[in-house]
Amino acid sequence: MLPERAMMTAIGAPPRTVRMVVAGQALYISALGALVGLVAGTVTGVALSRPMTTHGAGDLATIAIPWPFVIAVVVGLPVLATAAALITRTRLPLARRLL
């Protein structure tokens, strides 16, 4: 993330553009992490809870999923990360180049 910010600052990009790029990166990374975590958690949760809840060979397990919590994490986390990236200071100190 730092090389992109340094390059945009060097070519004179406005601070708003730099913040939008940082916010886009935060949104992408957090959304991807939330979705991968949702899939991994669902597969693991079902695999671990099914043997504990079935009573016979043909009995289907009933699994309760906390939908409000799942939606809050999968949607809320990327929104929170994007909002934090938009309000964070994006100015970099100018780097000196030694010849």
Image (cartoon, rainbow, N blue to C red):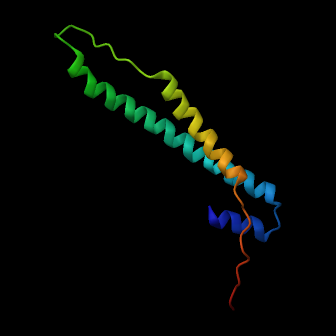
Q: Is residue 65 above or below residue 37?
A: above
Q: Position of residue 72 (x, y in %)?
A: 55, 30
Horizontal side of 97 relative to 78 (left or right) equals right
Query: Disc count in the image?
Result: 0
Quarter of the image where the N terminus is located: bottom right
Give the farthest residue toward the top: 58
Question: Which residue appears at 74% of the width and 66% of the height?
Answer: 91
Question: Which residue appears at 80% of the width and 68% of the height?
Answer: 11
Horizontal side of 63 relative to 21 (left or right) equals left
Q: Is residue 91 above or below residue 99?
A: above
Horizontal side of 28 relative to 57 (left or right) equals right
Q: Position of residue 93 (x, y in %)?
A: 72, 74
Q: Position of residue 54 (x, y in %)?
A: 21, 14
Give the farthest residue toward the bottom: 99
Using the image as rendered, state which of residue 76 and residue 51 is in the foreground.
76
Q: Is residue 46 above or below residue 56?
A: below
Question: Which residue appears at 59% of the width and 35% of the height?
Answer: 76
Using the image as rendered, state which of residue 59 and residue 71 is in the foreground.
71
Question: Which residue appears at 75% of the width and 58% of the height?
Answer: 18
Quarter of the image where the C terminus is located: bottom right
Q: Position of residue 23 (x, y in %)?
A: 68, 49
